[in-house]
Image (tube, helix red, strand yellow):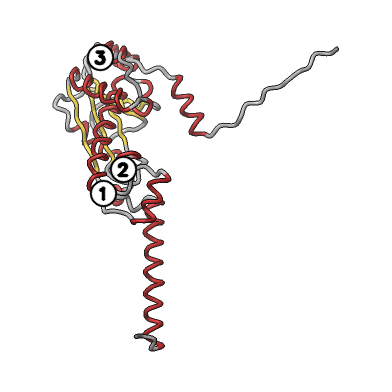
Amino acid sequence: MAPTLTTRTSKPVSPATAKQRMLKQLVCSDAPEQALRLRGFVRIAGVDEVGRGALFGPVVAAAVILPECMDTLAEAGLKDSKQLPREAREELDALVRGMALAVSVAEVDAATIDQVNIYQATRMVMHAAVQGLAVEPDHLLIDAMRLDHPCSQTKLIYGDALSLSIAAASVVAKVYRDALMRKLDEAHPGYGLASHKGYGTAEHRRALREFGPTALHRKTFAPVRATLQQAILGEQAVSNLLFNDMETGEWD
């Protein structure tokens, strides 16, 4: 009897899932920093942002200058903050702040994001974080971005998954922004900010439709803009109805 051959077909995955699987294969280490030290750089600042894709609140960036020896952070499992649970992020945040030569955090608010666009706001907030460092860096390691800054710099794609300095900045920025979102959740109840941190989840979009945007929502972002447009159309419909009633004399 001839053997029966079976074929195994893999299920298609979304681009987002494929990217996450790829990122998990990357090794976060001090290799980028070591390469820069061989070129004579000493005060290397890792720079990263969080909140770029959120619908609510500021975009936040951190800049971190770590000492030459980063073994403690590597052994503690430091990597891209998005791949870490909250408890691990907060422990690593404390560890980074305790051993760093300098740490700086900056934020750019929703109104400015709407005014200049999120790309420029991201560059602004990263620049501000670097400017806020108490120790002047001699090189910047930046996650997928270049800044209008005189300091020598390296743009590293997927930097928060490859460089311990950038990962440290990622963790510091995320812990800061997540804490801010929990605080703002108390000021703006009903939107679920403490859980989704301002991102466009189904829960958040439902709240937007029910309550409308707050002053801290990014009004140029499509889901928020659509809600505002819908509200304007609704007001126009009511206004038209009222004026039509006035013209026909149908008032009590």
Residue at 36%, 85% in the rendered image: 251
Category of crowding for the residue at label 2, using alpha-carbon neighbours closer than 10 angstroms: few (below 14), some (14–19), many (at least 20):
many
Residue at 22%, 19% in the rendered image: 95
Residue 244 is situated, as x and y percent measured from the top left of the image, at: 41, 82
Res 208 visible: yes
Disc assigned to residue 40 = 3
Asked whether, in this view, residue 217 is left or right of residue 65, the answer is: right
Res 148 visible: no
Amino acid type of the residue tagged 2 in the rendering: Leu
Asked whether, in this view, residue 112 is left or right of residue 55, the answer is: left
Question: Does the residue at mark 1 contact the one at mark 3 (Cβ under 8 Å)?
Answer: no
Point out the tag, 3 or 2, that comes first from the N-terminus: 3
Point out the tag, 2 or 1, that comes first from the N-terminus: 1
Question: Does the residue at mark 2 contact the one at mark 1 (Cβ under 8 Å)?
Answer: yes
Residue at 53%, 34% in the rendered image: 14
Disc assigned to residue 193 = 2
As drawn, the residue found furthest toward the left would be 134
